[in-house]
Amino acid sequence: MHNSEKYLESLLTATPQEGRELAIKLARKSIAAIQTDPEMRKVLRANYAQDTAQLIASAQVIAVEFQTIAMANNYWKP
Amino acid sequence: MHNSEKYLESLLTATPQEGRELAIKLARKSIAAIQTDPEMRKVLRANYAQDTAQLIASAQVIAVEFQTIAMANNYWKP
Amino acid sequence: MHNSEKYLESLLTATPQEGRELAIKLARKSIAAIQTDPEMRKVLRANYAQDTAQLIASAQVIAVEFQTIAMANNYWKP
Amino acid sequence: MHNSEKYLESLLTATPQEGRELAIKLARKSIAAIQTDPEMRKVLRANYAQDTAQLIASAQVIAVEFQTIAMANNYWKP
Amino acid sequence: MHNSEKYLESLLTATPQEGRELAIKLARKSIAAIQTDPEMRKVLRANYAQDTAQLIASAQVIAVEFQTIAMANNYWKP
Amino acid sequence: MHNSEKYLESLLTATPQEGRELAIKLARKSIAAIQTDPEMRKVLRANYAQDTAQLIASAQVIAVEFQTIAMANNYWKP
């Protein structure tokens, strides 16, 4: 797993919405770190987007990543 | 995953009940971020609503999202 | 998922035991939010109560919900 | 799920070891809250004790319950 | 589940590495608490060590146990 | 599971990106602690890198490990 790409500069985001987007990005980058072939990932994605069990499992990953990001941003409290 | 919709203004809610509703919304939006076709999601939802394993997995996602929201709201302590 | 029922007034409970009961209630309400037909839920429940994998997955949901409730109650420390 | 038994007096334990035992007890009680027939649970347990996937899933429940108990006890720091 | 063995004296470890080892030990002990026959566990382990889904699930248990241990040790900060 | 290799000196990293890389390393080392044969791991990895369910499960492990590392680093706040 050689993942030399730098994709995470900071956990801080301006808004909760951007925090969600970062959580989704982190989840995707984890998968890309294991399955390093972009063409293969494209094929795999087409399949799992129609498999609800895998969609739900993906949502679980996003939920955990978002929890970390929300903590880092002190929940974007005003 | 182009998810340009802005669906999360704030993690703060007036009541714990609204916190539950936000948790469910976040879980749904994660799935929508991966399976972007609304018609396809409608088909998929009809199936998984009758599959207890997937219902339980969905409840797990909601539980994690709710934990984050509850932390953000300091558990709605009076 | 129209879930207009108000089922969560507060995360605070008098005792840890009541915290467990609330955790179980929250887990059930998540499932009810997705599978909104009570008759269907009754059928589904009879099945999964005999499936250990699903019983264990349900216990996992309860564990996460309980963690949130325990935090909210500062672990019911005297 | 009528679970009128009182099985959790406190999250505080004298030692980490007792914390582990309480975590296992909580996991079991969650399952008992859903599958309320003790004879059925005995049958089910004999099966899943030979299924490594379910053993590992059970260990995951115990890990989460233990995390909550450890927090409650401030990690039994001297 | 009679698990009278005392295997957890403390969550405190001298180093993060020892924390990892304790996390693995706790995960194993959870499984031993349910499947109490050591010979049966040996058979089961040979199987799941070749099943990546179960290896990944085991890694998830270790991750949660380690999180608890890391919290207890204040992340071994100097 | 004899895992005498020392692979974790510290949870502290200079950047969030290095924190991601450490999370991936920890997830891998957990699997190596159970499946100790490197040749067998190479075979298994080739399989699961094409199985989206397992890729997502791996991403879940990474998310939890990263949460611990992020906490240890106080989220790399400036």
Image: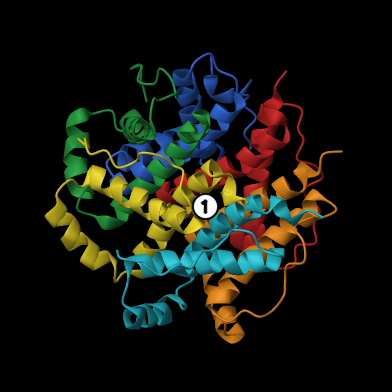
Chain colours: A red, B blue, C green, D yellow, E cyan, F orange
Name the image quarter holding the C terminus of chain E: bottom right
Q: Nearer the viewer, residue D63 or A40?
A: D63
Name the image quarter holding the N terminus of chain E: bottom left
Q: Position of residue D56 (x, y in %)?
A: 41, 63
> Image quadrant of residue A1?
bottom right
Which residue is rendered at x = 63% and y = 66% of the image?
A: E20
Say which amino acid is labelled 1.
Ala
- Asked whether residue C55 is in view, the answer is yes
> Image quadrant of residue B74?
top right
Which residue is rendered at x = 47% and y = 20% of the image?
A: B16
Q: How many marks?
A: 1
Q: Nearer the viewer, residue C48 or E44?
A: E44
Q: Position of residue C21 (x, y in %)?
A: 32, 33
- Asked whether residue B34 is in view, the answer is no
Which residue is rendered at x = 47% and y = 54% of the image?
A: D63
Q: Position of residue A13 (x, y in %)?
A: 76, 32
Apparent side of residue D34 relative to residue A73 in the rendered image (left or right): left
Apparent side of residue A53 relative to residue D74 in the rendered image (left or right): left
Q: Chain of mark 1?
A: A
Kindly identify which residue carries mark 1: A46
